[in-house]
Amino acid sequence: MDKNSKLYAAVLVFGPMCSGKSEISKKIAEKKGLAYINPDAFWNRGSGEEFTRDLGNMNFSRAYGQMIYCIQSGKSFLLDSALKRKIDRQEVLTILRDMDSFVPEYNFRIIGIYVASTLDICLKRNKLRPGQQSEEKIKEYHNYFEKEIPSKSEGFDEFYTIINNGKGLPDLGKYLF
């Protein structure tokens, strides 16, 4: 790496619905001065509008636009999204690697942060939020992560697992790279 080039980060925070991803993501983005990108920001959870695959795809397209803007303007960013399947994470990693090759001076590393929580905690957290999801949807997302446990081997430059035990925000000191 050229000594004049700066190292940027694309941080992906993912995990089951209601595991505490957004709370943790916002804290990390704030502490590290990262642009915060969340596809759910384009959906009013409390509106009663059901979250569908089409809505998710449309929102993710908008999030990709924000990521492209960050890369083109040389800003590190954090993507807060469930990315429930390995193939979903692979898609984002591939797109980010492709973007990096088009803007070589960006020179970023991709950091994965998996927020793990028990199904019981996710169900309890869901009951406290506006626009609750169905128990079936929470279980479905949770099951994906049990079947395909995320790891660094998926292509992350750095990888961390944060366990949210439901007793307040976990200590993020060691994750604030």
Image (cartoon, rainbow, N blue to C red):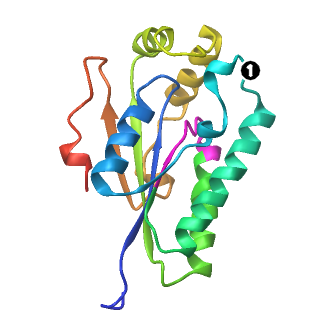
Please tell me how crowded label 1 is: few (under 14), some (14-19), or many (20+) other residues with Cα within 10 Å: few
The picture places residue 177, in percent across and down from the top left corner, at: 25, 56
Please tell me whether residue 138 is drawn above or below residue 110 in the rendered image: above
Horizontally, residue 177 falls left or right of residue 142, namely left
Q: Could you say where residue 125 lies in the image, as x and y percent from the top left?
A: 44, 14
Q: Farthest residue to the right: give it.
A: 54
Residue drawn at x 61%, y 36% is 40
- Foreground residue among 123 and 160: 123
Residue 2 place in picture, x, y as percent: 35, 91
**Residue at image x 66%, y 59%?**
65
Residue 167 found in image quarter = top left
Residue under label 1, please give it.
50
In the image, the segment drawn in magenta is 78-88
Pinpoint residue 135: horizontal percent, then vertical percent: 60, 9
| Residue 18 included in the magenta stretch of the image | no
Q: Quadrant of the N terminus?
A: bottom left
Give, as a three-letter code, the residue at label 1.
Glu
State the SS at label 1: loop
Residue in front for this viewpoint, 104 or 44: 44
